[in-house]
Image (cartoon, rainbow, N blue to C red):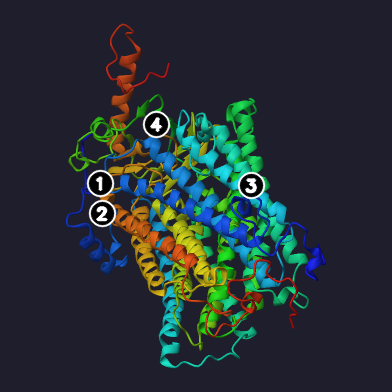
């Protein structure tokens, strides 16, 4: 594929200039834009399903006492809310953005491995149908938490093997997606686009893809061992058989911590594209931004122990994990400072992508601060397993990762559809989201510090007030997201014609702005020259 | 267990509409918490052990460092957002793309701040892991969904289970129709609490019989997982004069009734604790001697 970019001849015979008609276009899709669209639509559907589960959780927690659901069902909701949001909403959304934007940004006609691309997407609907169908099997959905800690996860009913198989499929899909991203970036860049000229979004995905290839097999191994412990009488994690339940936690978090960065690094890339555009000024310190992403990726492999301080650990290990975790604040700080410097002495305007990017800057930083607090081992003993942790990771994932995705969608949507969307509606969506995400999650800091454990369906009455505030924020935030779908659907159907550069005063770091809007079906059929 | 002692037991629900309270609390900020023992509803408790106070101090220190950084960074961001608006005619300075000097400075300064935060934290870690010279050891075994306390040392032979109190258990059933606010210490009350002496270094040896649980009493600054096949250690010494009832909950998801296995610790003076130990031992002997008699207390288990 190394010379795929050089001419039209690399196209296979069955690639036409126009998309195939009807269902075949999607079922047999090999076009990066079609597959990207499917990923994004799939992710949006999962976002609403996972969100509905969150609404069940917040409704039950609105007041003390059990009003709506049984504790087992509550645990099923928390467990599957997490699995669906992580593997179904956030990760596929980033893969969808990668599919759409990486070929456009680097001047390639398509992804390097289009058939594998098709396969990696089409696994997902089956994986999640399998996962969601566990709602109807005896014993219901998995209820042991998304972290699947044994021995609790081994108490799962008939849905257990279905859950494990679903996770295996998600993992295979992610690994294939990651291979495709790496091969595309390494081989299909336009002539003259050396690595340091590559746009930040593509850079962040290159590093993310390596993280995925490194850790998804680890998760697959961990859940396979769970499977054999459950069905084949092995004792990897069974203390009575000489196994070690804490070993699962080590293996899981060796996957789990890089996974956290898999869900945030592409958002860093998106923010690094948007802030310069709407500040009308190049990204400040672009090279150190790349080094910062790489440093964060490296550090993500040596901090997993901070999830397990309360499980008992030698002093030396506690000190090591505390310090390595705190170190992550340094490259993250560099990123936040560089973003701020990008806006400094710029000429700012506040279109929806910029609004989401600015909210990301503030609110992700709050998640970073609580992360720093959690790194302090003795304090972690008080915060661990409470709503303080829930507040922390939701600040990082909702106004962090998800606002990053929304910023990206609002940024590139006109490039995809060829139409401008309703700025008023998108801004309304922004303000409702930005306000209610704080009403939803900020009080959870207080709940955690005041002593409310996480993952409980009912609570002591002194936690009532903040839970009510949080639930009201949750319902309002959830409802606001309907606007997001409305804006996207409207924009897909029509609207004011978008120009090639879309945003006035763009500083194009990527080549996507040199193509007309909507981008032609086969992107760059002749590779552009980058100087 | 309905005896309450001291002022450490005030778990009654604060009054006033939620939104008004939220505004007041936000306005008051976190600084007003100093001096309270139990949590005021939005911050960590100062607690009643040296450990919980050390943790509180670390927590507030890191919190204020974060507030300081936030004020500085958010201040600059807000200034930029106000000052450099295109609608105000701002002209972009497209030459401002890089400065090695500035970037080195804002890499070094965070490192220094982190080192300053890590040193006191490391000291506390060393202290909390030092379980030597304990004066009373209690073996704590977790089950789905209750705690078992087996005393060693002076309390040798005392062994009982601790489960959710009956009135809480009735009220927490789905559609029970009972208002939790009418139940004293809803979900934070047990049938038989763990009793310990104040001013004594108490060591807990934690394990589990089924899944992973976690023993947590915020006022002691004490949380540790109870893991099958492992014995985790944990220690605390409650300050003399701070006798009273302290409450906590299981902190690790352990299945259906994870939210319903509270921890209650009754801290007594060493003399009162001795009396309690004697009572318990007498009860154990009475239960063990005439096998034909009905057990005097369902909550007491003989040690075989």
Circle on res. B145: 4
Asked if the residue at tag 1 contacts the one at tag 2, i.e. Cβ–Cβ closer than 8 Å, the answer is no
For marks 2 and 3, give the one nearer the viewer.
3
SS at mark 2 in the image: helix
Circle on res. A171: 3
- The C terminus of chain A lies in which quarter of the figure? bottom right
Please name whichever residue, B288 or A248, is drawn nearer the observer in this view of the structure. A248
In the displayed orientation, state which residue is furthest to the top: B292
- Same chain, labels 3 and 1: yes
Mark found first going from the N terminus, 2 or 3: 3
Query: Which residue is labeled 1 in the image?
Result: A461
Q: Is residue A530 left or right of residue A499?
A: right
SS at mark 3 in the image: helix
Chain under callout 1? A
Q: Residues within 10 Å of mark 1 (few under 14, many from 20)?
A: many
Q: Is residue B46 left or right of residue A278?
A: left
Q: Can residue A256 be spotted in the picture? A: yes
SS at mark 1 in the image: helix
Q: Residues within 10 Å of mark 4 (few under 14, many from 20)?
A: many
- The N terminus of chain A lies in which quarter of the figure? bottom right
Q: Is residue B60 left or right of residue B175?
A: right
Q: From what the image shows, is residue A271 above or below residue B174?
A: below
Residue drawn at x 49%, y 40% as measured from the top left: A132
Q: From what the image shows, is residue B173 above or below residue B93?
A: above
For marks 3 and 1, give the one nearer the viewer.
3
- Same chain, labels 3 and 4: no
Asked if the residue at tag 1 contacts the one at tag 3, i.e. Cβ–Cβ closer than 8 Å, the answer is no
Q: From what the image shows, is residue A90 above or below residue B157?
A: below
Asked if the residue at tag 4 contacts the one at tag 3, i.e. Cβ–Cβ closer than 8 Å, the answer is no
Circle on res. A465: 2
- Same chain, labels 4 and 2: no
Chain under callout 4? B
């Amino acid at each position: 594929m190394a010379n795929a970019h050089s001419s039209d001849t690399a196209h296979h015979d069955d690639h036409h200039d126009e998309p195939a008609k009807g269902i075949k276009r999607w079922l047999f899709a090999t076009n990066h834009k079609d597959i990207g669209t499917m990923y994004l639509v799939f992710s949006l559907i999962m976002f609403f399903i996972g969100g509905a589960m969150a609404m069940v959780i917040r409704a039950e927690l609105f007041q003390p006492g059990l009003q709506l659901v049984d504790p087992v069902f509550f645990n099923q909701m928390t467990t599957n809310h997490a699995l669906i949001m992580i593997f179904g909403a956030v990760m596929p959304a980033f893969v969808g953005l990668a599919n759409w934007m990486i070929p456009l940004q680097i001047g390639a006609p398509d992804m390097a491995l289009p058939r594998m691309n098709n396969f990696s997407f089409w696994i997902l609907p089956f994986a999640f149908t399998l996962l969601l169908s566990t709602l109807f099997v005896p014993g219901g959905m998995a209820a042991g938490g998304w972290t699947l800690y044994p021995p609790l996860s081994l108490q799962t009913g008939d849905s257990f093997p279905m859950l494990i198989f679903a996770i295996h499929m998600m993992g295979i899909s992610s690994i294939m997606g990651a291979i495709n991203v790496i091969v595309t970036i390494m081989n299909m860049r336009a002539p003259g686009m050396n690595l340091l000229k590559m746009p930040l979004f593509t850079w962040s995905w290159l590093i993310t893809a390596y993280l995925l290839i490194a850790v998804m097999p680890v998760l697959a191994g961990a859940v396979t061992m769970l499977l054999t412990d459950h069905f084949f009488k092995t004792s990897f994690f069974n203390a009575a058989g000489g196994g070690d339940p804490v070993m699962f936690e080590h293996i899981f978090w060796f996957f789990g911590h890089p996974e956290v960065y898999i869900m945030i690094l592409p958002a860093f890339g998106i923010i690094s594209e948007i802030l310069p555009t709407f500040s009308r000024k190049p990204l400040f310190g672009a090279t150190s931004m790349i080094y910062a992403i790489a440093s964060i990726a490296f550090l993500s492999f040596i901090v997993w122990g901070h999830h397990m301080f309360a499980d008992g650990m030698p002093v030396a290990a506690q000190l090591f994990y505390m310090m390595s975790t705190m170190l992550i604040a340094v490259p993250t700080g560099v990123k936040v400072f560089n973003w701020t410097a990008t806006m400094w002495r710029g000429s700012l305007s506040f279109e929806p992508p910029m609004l989401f990017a600015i909210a990301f800057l503030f609110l992700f930083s709050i998640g970073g601060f609580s992360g720093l607090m959690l790194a302090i081992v003795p304090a972690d003993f008080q915060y661990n397993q409470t709503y303080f942790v829930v507040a922390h990771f939701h600040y990082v994932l909702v106004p962090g990762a998800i606002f990053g995705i929304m910023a990206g969608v609002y940024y590139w949507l006109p490039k995809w559809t060829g139409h401008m969307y309703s700025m008023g509606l998108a801004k309304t969506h922004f303000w409702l989201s930005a306000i209610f995400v704080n009403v939803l999650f900020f009080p959870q800091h207080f709940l955690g510090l005041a002593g409310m454990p996480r993952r409980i369906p009912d609570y002591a009455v002194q936690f009532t007030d903040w839970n009510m505030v949080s639930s009201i924020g949750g319902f309002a935030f959830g409802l606001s997201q309907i606007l997001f779908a409305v804006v996207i659907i409207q924009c897909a159907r029509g609207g004011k014609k978008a120009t090639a550069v879309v945003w006035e005063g763009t500083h194009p770091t990527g080549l996507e702005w040199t193509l007309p809007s909507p981008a032609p079906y086969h992107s760059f059929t002749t590779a552009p020259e980058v100087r | 267990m309905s005896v309450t002692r001291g002022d450490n037991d005030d778990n009654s629900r604060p009054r006033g509409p939620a939104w008004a309270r939220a505004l007041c609390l936000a306005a008051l900020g976190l600084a007003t918490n100093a001096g309270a023992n139990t949590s005021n509803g939005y911050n960590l408790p100062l607690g009643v052990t040296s450990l919980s106070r050390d943790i509180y101090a670390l927590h507030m220190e890191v919190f204020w460092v974060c507030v300081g950084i936030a004020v500085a960074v958010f201040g600059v961001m807000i200034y930029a957002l106000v000052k450099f608006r295109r609608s105000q005619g701002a002209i972009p300075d497209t030459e401002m793309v890089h400065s090695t000097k500035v970037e080195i400075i804002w890499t070094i300064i965070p490192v220094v701040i982190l080192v300053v935060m890590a040193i006191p934290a490391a000291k506390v870690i060393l202290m909390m892991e030092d379980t030597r010279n304990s004066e009373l050891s209690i073996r704590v075994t977790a089950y789905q969904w209750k705690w078992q306390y087996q005393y060693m040392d002076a309390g040798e032979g005392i062994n009982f289970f601790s489960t959710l109190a009956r009135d809480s258990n009735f009220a927490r059933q789905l559609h029970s129709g009972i208002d939790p606010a009418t139940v004293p210490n809803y979900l934070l009350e047990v049938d038989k609490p763990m009793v310990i002496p104040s001013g004594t270094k108490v060591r807990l040896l934690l394990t589990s019989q089924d899944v992973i649980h976690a023993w947590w009493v915020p006022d002691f600054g004490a949380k540790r997982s109870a893991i099958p096949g492992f014995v985790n250690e944990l220690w605390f010494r409650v300050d003399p004069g701070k006798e009273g009832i302290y409450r906590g909950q299981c902190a690790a998801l352990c299945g259906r009734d994870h939210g319903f296995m509270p921890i209650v610790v009754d801290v007594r003076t060493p003399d009162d604790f001795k009396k309690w130990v004697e009572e318990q031992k007498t009860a154990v002997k009475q239960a063990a001697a005439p096998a034909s008699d009905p057990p005097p207390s369902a909550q007491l288990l003989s040690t075989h």
